[in-house]
């Protein structure tokens, strides 16, 4: 038996829609695999009642199929589905690492990215790697059609998850099909600033680079309390705030000293809007970790 812990992730970071992603120190999914004549999946943990265990309808089943690696697969969900923290990607990344090792397929983490991303297509309707790449590789990732660029980064973040849910499909339906050139120019500037900030572990530059006038404004309308939470986080010291992935989670970047105040301000602002939430105070961290023999 093999066990893999794969982290939650936050995609887009505002200016990098469908391209940028970061691995978070917490929460995480844990997947256990053992060889079996055919794939079976059982799921426990956060939101497990909403996830199909039929391998044909599960991202992990798609990964097992792609690797030709039938297995008994047990998933312990730490990452709640439809929260904006790459829930299905964490399971897909964990399964890809575990099954690759279980069947000695010898694929690199980079080679596992498109395989895990295929599983995403089952959930969102199209394959994109901005969540699976950081869950597999850790740090900050730039996922494009040409492959993935990764850098390690140690940026403090707060991921605040309201009790509400937004489906990735619904959040993709509101994404505009075209953008004004001036907004594209601004976004390129922000994305470049954010990338430099990640390479320097600089929360000020990363926060400054999270602004986006193209996709994010369309999505915030789907999140009750978004503007109040954003303002409260900035007031408490956050250097940047945006929708985490497809939402409704909200990601704030900050200096470590301000992390506790930012988390409290976000929870209080959601509360004032009548929405319960919880906040993870964590940092950009490592990718999926393999444990042999279930240890
Ligand atoms: N980039 C994706 C989106 C992430 O924002 O729709 C969610 O799967």
Image (tube, helix red, strand yellow):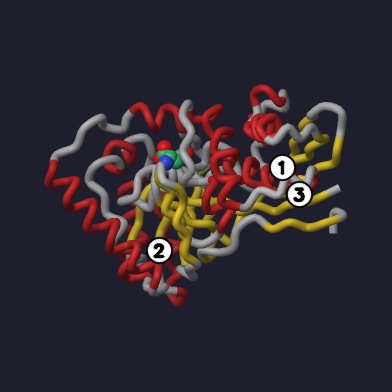
Label 2 crowd bin: few (<14), some (14–19), many (20+), radius 10 Å: many
Looking at marks 2 and 3 on the same chain, the residue that comes earlier in the sequence is marked by 3
Mark 1 secondary-structure assignment: strand
Of the numbered discs in the image, which one, if any, rests on residue 45?
1
Q: Position of residue 149 (x, y in %)?
A: 44, 56
Q: Are marks 2 and 3 in contact (CB under 8 Å)?
A: no
Of the numbered discs in the image, which one, if any, rests on residue 101?
3
Between disc 3 and disc 1, the foreground one is 3
Of the numbered discs in the image, which one, if any, rests on residue 253?
2
Q: Residue at x 31, y 56 (%)?
A: 210
Real-space CA distance between mark 2 and mark 3, rounded to the nearest whole angstrom: 35 Å
Of the numbered discs in the image, which one, if any, rests on residue 167?
none
Q: Position of residue 182 (x, y in %)?
A: 12, 46
Q: Position of residue 214 (x, y in %)?
A: 24, 42
Mark 3 secondary-structure assignment: helix
- Seen from the viewer's position, the closer of residues 118 and 187 is 118
Mark 2 secondary-structure assignment: strand
Q: Residue at x 58, y 33 (%)?
A: 119
């Amino acid at each position: 038996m093999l066990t893999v812990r794969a982290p939650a992730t936050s995609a887009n970071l505002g200016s990098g829609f469908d391209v940028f992603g970061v691995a978070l120190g917490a929460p995480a999914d844990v997947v256990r695999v053992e060889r079996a004549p055919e794939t079976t999946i059982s799921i426990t943990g956060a939101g497990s009642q909403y996830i199909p265990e039929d391998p044909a309808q599960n991202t992990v089943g798609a990964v097992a199929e792609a690797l030709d690696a039938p297995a008994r697969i047990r998933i312990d969900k730490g990452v709640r589905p439809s929260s904006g923290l790459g829930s299905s990607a964490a399971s897909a990344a964990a399964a890809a690492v575990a099954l690759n090792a279980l069947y000695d397929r010898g694929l690199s983490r980079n080679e596992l990215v498109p395989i895990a991303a295929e599983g995403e297509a089952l959930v969102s309707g199209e394959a994109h790697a901005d969540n699976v790449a950081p869950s597999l590789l850790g740090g900050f990732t730039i996922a494009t059609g040409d492959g993935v660029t990764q850098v390690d980064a140690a940026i403090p973040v707060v991921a605040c998850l309201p009790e509400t849910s937004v489906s990735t499909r619904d959040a993709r339906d509101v994404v505009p099909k075209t953008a004004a050139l001036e907004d594209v120019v601004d976004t390129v500037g922000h994305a470049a600033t954010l990338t430099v900030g990640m390479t320097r572990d600089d929360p000020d530059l990363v926060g400054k680079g999270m602004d986006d006038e193209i996709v994010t404004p369309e999505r915030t309308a789907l999140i009750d309390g978004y503007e109040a939470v954003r303002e409260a986080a900035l007031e408490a010291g956050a250097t940047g705030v945006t929708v985490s992935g497809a939402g409704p989670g909200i990601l704030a970047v900050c200096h470590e000293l301000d992390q506790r105040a930012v988390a409290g301000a976000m929870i209080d602002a959601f509360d004032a809007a009548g929405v319960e939430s919880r906040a993870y105070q964590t940092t950009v961290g490592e990718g999926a970790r393999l444990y042999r023999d279930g240890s």
